[in-house]
Image (tube, rainbow, N blue to C red):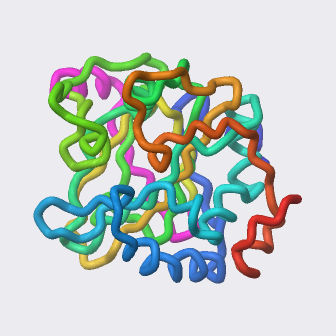
Amino acid sequence: MLTGEQIQLFEQDGYILLPEVFDEAELDKLRGELPEVFGEAGPHRVVEAESGVVRGVHGVHETNPVFGALVRLPRLVEPARRLLGDDVYVHQFKINAKLALVGEVWEWHQDYRFWRDEDGMPSPRALSAAIFLDRVDEFNGPLMVVPGSHEDGVHETTVRDDAGWAETLAAKLKYSLNVEALAHATSGRGIVAPKGEAGSVLLFHSNLLHGSTPNMSPSNRTIALVSYNSVENRLNEVPDPRPEFIASRKFVPLMTIDDEALVANGSPVSA
């Protein structure tokens, strides 16, 4: 459970970093699934434009029992419930891989802009839990955030009108901040790159401005991201919805599982 100070920091800055949420045995279990989920071809898998290596996979919590268990762990679900003030479901799940020397950028953006305009999410009553499967440092493409920017509403962005849903996942995003908007947002706030050991978890608001640099190090940087949405914030109908593996329309409150299930066998046993 989060402390009062942690809740206050999240409300003030739009993010908090929680160290040592997962131990080495649990990380080994999660990392052991990566070759299988990265090896499954399909539209849910995105590769880097230049190198062809895997950039990310989406929605594998629905097909892989270990990642299916991960999204239901109380240590992730309960903070999400507390910060959003409601029961939650998984709006989106992805594993972002930035392999050593070839992992590319994520342009500056707000998740909620995509979730509102592409998926029909009524309000930014959602957050993401970024689980560090590798150590994240200043060299391997850490997530960068603008503290307090979640309070600004939705920023004006450059929009690629010809982009389809695939461009909501690629290095060149459909909605991205231009330099003037970024300069305005960071004025008096600066930019922070939360770093931590493998097993740390970064919780961040759906409206928080964030992006990341290329991985210029010899170390991989792999992060699993679980995006939780309030069940009261269920998506509206949109003309051309993104696939279910990107934006879920299963608005059923998550049932948590026993913490031991992740290492035991990955089976999502209801608590």
The residue lying toward the viewer, choosing from 115 and 152, is 115
Left/right of residue 97 with respect to residue 216 in the rendered view:
right
At a point 35% along the width and 63% down the height, the residue shown is 42
Determine if residue 5 is in view.
no
Q: Is residue 147 above or below residue 59?
A: above
Determine if residue 108 is in view.
yes
Image spot of residue 52 (x, y percent): 18, 69
Most common SS among magenta residues: loop
Q: Is residue 113 above or below residue 105?
A: above
Image spot of residue 168 (x, y percent): 30, 40
Image spot of residue 59 (x, y percent): 50, 55
- Residue 145 position by quadrant: top left
Find the magenta span and give its range. 178-200
Q: Is residue 16 above or below residue 101?
A: above
Image spot of residue 233 (x, y percent): 63, 24
Q: Is 230 colored magenta in this rendering?
A: no
